[in-house]
Structures are given as structure tokens and as C-alpha cells.
Amino acid sequence: MKEIAYAVRVTGRVQGVAYRAWTQGQARALGLRGWVRNRGDGSVEALIAGPEAAVEAMVTAMGEGPGAARVTDVWTEPADPGPVPAGFAIRA
């Protein structure tokens, strides 16, 4: 099973709508590693690593987000999956 990682940035109404907690729950359910945090510009960024199919499914899900979110864009950039620690954290 091929491991991949993406740095992800999500824009829209994604802060104050439990987007980070939702992302953490989805990532854990998919067995992914990484983290998610709010950015000062109102967007959310994440680093997601794991099996290719699960990472791709997570990126797709992030385009929808939780019910109160209104995602306008999702940008991804390939990252090195090697140094991503186990677990999925919400960072400040």
C-alpha cells in the first residue's frame, strides 16, 4: 500500500464551525496521521499522511467539511510522508 502525504489549505467559512474537530475525527476514522490548525487569514491548513486511497478520500471530504462550513477552495501540495508522526492532532 503506497503512502503519500499532502499539505492542504482550505478557504471559505471554515473557522468557528468545528472544522478542525471534524477533520480530526474524519482523519482518525480513515487511519491517517498528521495535524490541522487555523491560520490567521481565516483559512485552515493541514498535513495529512497515510495510504494513498485514504488520503485522497480525506482531501475530497475536506472540500465538503462539516454541515456549518462553506468551503470555497481546497489546495493541496505533495509532502514527504516519512516525518509525519503517528496520530492526528489539532494544533493551535
Image: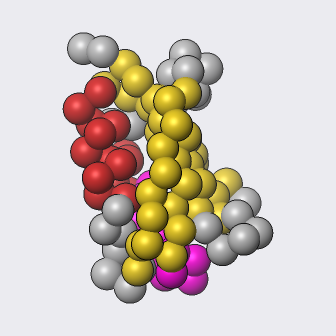
Q: What is the span of residues highlighted in magenta in the rendered image?
A: 13-24
Q: Is residue 52 visible from the viewing direction of this image?
A: yes
Left/right placement of residue 38 relative to residue 69 reads: right
The residue lying at 70 percent from left, 64 percent from top is 39
Residue 79 in picture, x, y percent from top left: 55, 27
Residue 41 placement: quadrant: bottom right
Left/right placement of residue 59 relative to residue 6 reads: left
| Picture layout, residue 67 above or below residue 52 | below
Q: Closer to the camera, 12 or 38?
A: 12
Left/right placement of residue 12 relative to residue 22 reads: right
Left/right placement of residue 83 relative to residue 71 reads: right
**42 within the magenta span:** no
Q: Closer to the camera, 9 or 67?
A: 9
Residue 57 placement: quadrant: top left
**21 within the magenta span:** yes
| Picture layout, residue 40 above or below residue 70 | above
